[in-house]
Image (cartoon, rainbow, N blue to C red):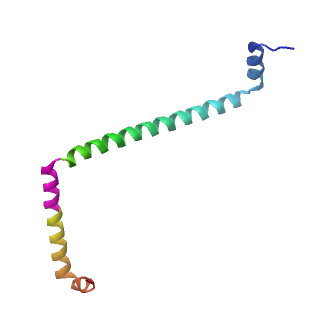
Amino acid sequence: MIININEIKQIIAEELSQTDKNDIERMIKQQLKSDLEDAVAKAVEKAVKEEVKSVMGDKATQKEMAEVSKKIIKKLYKDLSFHHPYIIDRIKI
């Protein structure tokens, strides 16, 4: 006995209840949503990395960041030396 494709589709359709169909639909929606979120996250991450790379490649930006870093380190050192001298005393050289 040979079963044609239409009979197979009918058998499958008859075997699935409405609850089964709803469950399948819900699972597909969840998977699509997850895939879309992953794709968006990757695209945003790539765009941010490219932008940071382009900005950080600029010599002026690097110099500016170096100056800001120096100021922060100087202020931290000054604060530690005046308000917490015991911390500096604990540094081993």
In the picture, measured across the screen, residue 31 lies left or right of residue 9, that is left
Magenta range: 58-68
The picture places residue 8, in percent across and down from the top left corner, at 76, 18
The picture places residue 59, in percent across and down from the top left corner, at 14, 50
The picture places residue 73, in percent across and down from the top left corner, at 18, 69
Would you say the magenta stretch is mainly helix, strand or loop?
A: helix
Q: Quadrant of residue 75?
A: bottom left
Seen from the viewer's position, the closer of residues 25 and 32 is 32
The picture places residue 19, in percent across and down from the top left corner, at 70, 31
Seen from the viewer's position, the closer of residues 55 and 8 is 55
Question: In percent of the image, x 77 and y 25: which residue is there?
Answer: 15
In the picture, measured across the screen, residue 66 lies left or right of residue 2, that is left
Question: In percent of the image, x 20 and y 46: which residue is there?
Answer: 55
Membership of 55 in magenta stretch: no
Question: In percent of the image, x 17 and y 66: which residue is there?
Answer: 72
Question: In percent of the image, x 15 and y 51: which residue is there?
Answer: 61
